[in-house]
Image (tube, helix red, strand yellow):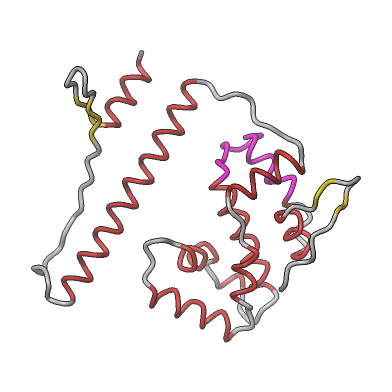
């Protein structure tokens, strides 16, 4: 599915990429849902990055529904992760792309319709004209904690994958490994040192 040409609609507002993709795939109800999820109305509030991933999964699911694959028997979330995940091997990604291609999904076209968190921000702020209320200190801490946790988990996963690859090639010793990532914060003037999560937890209690 190819992306429609950009133009202007809705009283002169620019047809940003998210809006164009929504129209191209017939996802008419998705815009209001994205707004609700960003504002946290009735659901846990989602970040722009998480919203972009959620949106892209809906695009992939819509493409699968128009293909020979059965959406009921297809784990769209797993397929999306295999297509876009940073720690997914090239071989796995290639196998997924070939499977989709064989079943009538234009993978390159679908991937070109995926959006970034910047595109999502433009869509919500400039197209739908909504903005979040200012976050409380507790919410800022929760956001920081979530971002650091995701980075730590990804670092551990990438490291473990690299070690397992080296083990298969006989470069490093074989055996089951657990990768531990310990992030420390050092205050250079005082010499005080904390685990980053300990520091955030202490800030919560103050």
Q: Nearer the viewer, residue 85 or 63?
A: 85
Residue situated furthest front in the rendering: 189
Q: What x and y, as percent, mark residue 7?
A: 84, 57
Q: Up-down: is 7 above or below 117?
A: below
Q: Which residues are magenta?
A: 31-48
Residue situated furthest right in the rendering: 11
Q: Is residue 199 left or right of residue 69?
A: left
Q: Nearer the viewer, residue 73 or 105?
A: 105
Q: Is residue 190 magenta?
A: no
Q: Is residue 190 left or right of residue 102?
A: left
Q: Up-down: is 109 above or below 84?
A: below
Q: Is residue 138 left or right of residue 181?
A: right
Residue situated furthest bottom in the rendering: 102
Q: Please tell me which residue is depicted at 71% across the width and 46% down the height of the picture.
A: 123
Q: Please tell me which residue is depicted at 79% across the width and 60% down the height of the picture.
A: 6
Quadrant occupied by the C terminus? top left
Residue situated furthest left in the rendering: 173
Within the image, what quadrant is residue 146 found in? Answer: top left
Q: Please tell me which residue is depicted at 76% across the width and 41% down the height of the picture.
A: 128
Within the image, what quadrant is residue 58 found in? Answer: bottom right
Q: What x and y, as percent, mark residue 127?
A: 77, 43
Q: Up-down: is 119 above or below 183?
A: below
Q: What x and y, as percent, mark residue 25?
A: 74, 65
Q: Nearer the viewer, residue 68 or 147?
A: 147
Within the image, what quadrant is residue 90 found in? Answer: bottom left
């Amino acid at each position: 599915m190819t992306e429609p040409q950009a133009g202007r609609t809705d009283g002169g507002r620019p047809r940003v990429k998210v809006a164009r993709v929504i129209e191209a795939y017939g996802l008419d109800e998705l815009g209001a849902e994205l707004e609700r999820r960003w504002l946290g109305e009735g659901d846990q509030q989602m970040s722009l990055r998480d919203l972009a991933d959620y949106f892209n999964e809906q695009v992939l699911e819509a493409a699968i529904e128009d293909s020979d694959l059965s959406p009921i028997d297809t784990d769209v979330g797993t397929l999306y992760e295999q297509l876009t995940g940073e720690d997914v091997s090239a071989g796995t990604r290639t196998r997924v792309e070939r499977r989709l291609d064989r079943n009538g999904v234009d993978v390159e076209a679908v991937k070109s319709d995926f959006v970034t968190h910047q595109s999502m921000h433009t869509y919500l702020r400039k197209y739908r004209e909504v903005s979040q209320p200012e976050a409380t200190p507790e919410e800022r801490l929760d956001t920081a904690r979530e971002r650091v946790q995701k980075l730590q988990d990804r670092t551990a996963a990438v490291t473990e994958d690299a070690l397992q690859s080296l083990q298969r090639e006989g470069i490093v010793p074989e055996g089951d490994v657990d990768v531990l990532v310990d992030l420390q914060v050092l205050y250079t003037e005082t010499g005080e040192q904390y685990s980053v999560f300990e520091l955030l937890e202490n800030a919560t209690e103050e």
